[in-house]
Amino acid sequence: MLFQQLQEQTVELGWSFYGPVLLFVALCALGVPVWAVIGASAAALIWWSGAVPMSLLGESLFSGIDAFALTAVPLFILTGDVLVRTGLSRKFLDVAEALTSWGKGGFGSATVLVCGMFAAISGSDAAGAAAVGRMTIARLVEAGYPRP
C-alpha cells in the first residue's frame, strides 16, 4: 500500500525551475562570467518560485555572506604574505629543514613542520598553505628542480 502511494506521487517541474536553468545555459553560452551567471540564475529561481519575498532578498543575501570566515581567511593569507615578504618564513623553513634534513624526504617533512608553525601563528591552514607553498616553490627552484 505504501509503495503504491510512493509510486503515484509525481513532481512536476514548471517554469519556476526550467526558466532559471535556461537562463543559466544562455548566459554561459554568451560568455558571461560564472559568478554573474550563478547570481542571476539564483535570483531568477528565488523570484519565480516565490521561496523568499523579493523585499527580503537583500537581507537574505547579506546574511548568507555575513560570516566570520569570509573576513578572517583573507586576513590570515595577508599575515602569511607579510611573513614571506619580511623573510621570517625563510628562517622558519631553515629551522625546519635543519630539524628534518637528516631523514628521508626531509624537505617534505620540513614543509609540513613549517605549515604547523604557520598554523600556530595565524590560526588558519589556508594562510599556511598559501605562504608555505609560495616559499617552498622558490626553494625547490633554487635547489635545481624544474619549475613545472
Image: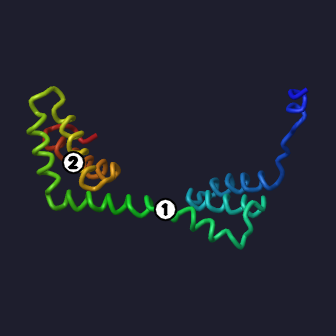
Bin the neighbour count of mark 2 within 10 Å (Cα to Cα): few under 14, some 14-19, many 20 and up: some
Image point 10% across, 45% down: which residue?
A: 94
Question: At which x and y percent is residue 121?
Answer: 24, 54
Image quadrant in which you'd find residue 63:
bottom right
Question: At which x and y percent is residue 101?
Answer: 11, 33
In the depicted structure, whether residue 110 falls above or below residue 118: above
Nearest the viewer among 66 and 103 is 66
Q: Secondary structure at mark 1?
A: loop
Image point 73% across, 56% down: which residue?
A: 20
Task: Kindly identify the amino acid type of the residue bearing the numbered disc 1.
Answer: Ala
Image point 56% across, 59% down: which residue?
A: 35
Image point 62% across, 61% down: which residue?
A: 39
Nearest the viewer among 69 and 54 is 69
Nearest the viewer among 59 and 97 is 59
Residue corresponding to mark 1: 67
Instruction: Check the image and name the residue furthest to the bottom.
Output: 55
Residue corresponding to mark 2: 117
The quadrant of the rendering that contains the C terminus is: top left
Asked whether the beta carbons under mark 1 and mark 2 sit within 8 Å of each other, the answer is: no
Question: At which x and y percent is residue 85?
Answer: 19, 61
Q: Is residue 5 left or right of residue 56?
A: right
Question: At which x and y percent is residue 46?
Answer: 72, 61
Q: Is residue 40 left or right of residue 12?
A: left
Image quadrant in which you'd find residue 96:
top left
The quadrant of the rendering that contains the N terminus is: top right
Task: Kindly identify the amino acid type of the residue bearing the numbered disc 2.
Answer: Met
Q: Earlier in the sequence, mark 1 or mark 2?
A: 1
Instruction: Check the image and name the residue furthest to the front.
Output: 1
Coloration of the structure image: rainbow
Bin the neighbour count of mark 1 within 10 Å (Cα to Cα): few under 14, some 14-19, many 20 and up: few
In the depicted structure, whether residue 53 falls above or below residue 9: below
**How far is mark 1 from mark 2, CA to CA?**
26 Å
